[in-house]
Amino acid sequence: MTDIQDANGPGTPRAARVAVVTGASRGLGRALARALAEDGYRLVVDARNGDALRAAMAGLPAGAVVSALAGDITDPAHRGDLSRAADTLGGPDLLINNAGTLGPSPLPAIADSPLDELRTAFEVNVLAPIALTQLLLPALRERGGAVLSITSDAAVEAYAGWGGYGAAKAALEQACNVLAAEEVAVRVWRVDPGDLRTRMHQDAFPGEDISDRPLPESVVPAFRRLISERMPSGRYRAADLMPAGDHNADQAAGGQAAGDHAAAAPAIEPVLGGPGRS
């Protein structure tokens, strides 16, 4: 399924930038897709649930152009559809690898993790984003684009129960780290957004109240800064990227004082932090 929405008939100028955002029906993916549309990007978005994806894209700014494709990111045919949709809109300038899976809920210990669940975690969180990146890389190189992959502090810290998800994110991080060393024309970022109030985070803590976590929209300014300033390839925490004086900085830092992060340099090397699992 493909839906192309254009609120103003002829659409945006042909020179408009194009972003591919996976897992855009909810949470951080939805927040980033909407922000990019506000910033003038044409969008190619996906999610497994087509109805949820269409609902998430409702209310985009006037003139927004979006190609919404329902499908599974692990499906090669679906990844091909995403690539062709991006080409149709002018070619990709930005790929955001946001789609992912937590695994079983509640989270099991490594000793009890079913191997088929671990295999799925690596297929969704590592192999699929690498495959999509490979597919879009020629166009991204040509356009001097960027690849942004969502990671977690579970990739660099040891949290009981987070072995499968954390190991998958660690593998994705190292793949991105090497890709950054190999690619000259393309920025390669991996970003830990911190603790957020999302369905995935709720699944990680079934039955617990996570209403104290900030909404995904609170960290959007950090991603906007990273993308607009075209920062060097590397690993970043959203809390360290929040613009100085931004009223969301306190939330994005997981409750720490905004001033603690206002002057902090972006964390390009892995930062070992608090108990948040993104």
Image: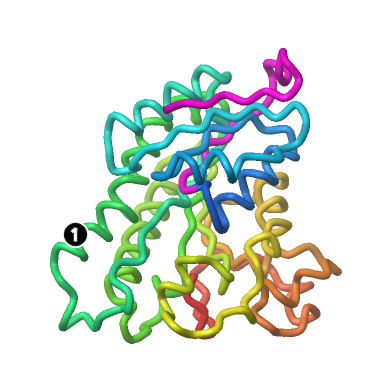
Q: Residue at x 40, y 43 (%)?
A: 182
Task: Identify the magenta region.
Answer: 1-23
Instruction: Decide: is 207 above or below 3.
Output: below
Q: Is residue 122 left or right of residue 174?
A: left
Instruction: Decide: is 64 above or below 133.
Output: above
Instruction: Decide: is 276 above or below 33.
Output: below
Q: Residue at x 72, y 24 (%)?
A: 7
Outermost residue, right direction? 245
Residue 278 seen from this side: yes
Q: Is residue 269 left or right of residue 136?
A: right
Q: Position of residue 82 (x, y in %)?
A: 42, 30
Amino acid type of the residue tagged 1 in the rendering: Arg
Q: Residue tagged by mark 1?
A: 119
- Provide the major secondary structure of the magenta segment: loop
Q: Position of residue 239 (x, y in %)?
A: 66, 70
Q: Position of residue 225 (x, y in %)?
A: 72, 53
Foreground of the two, 137 or 12 = 12
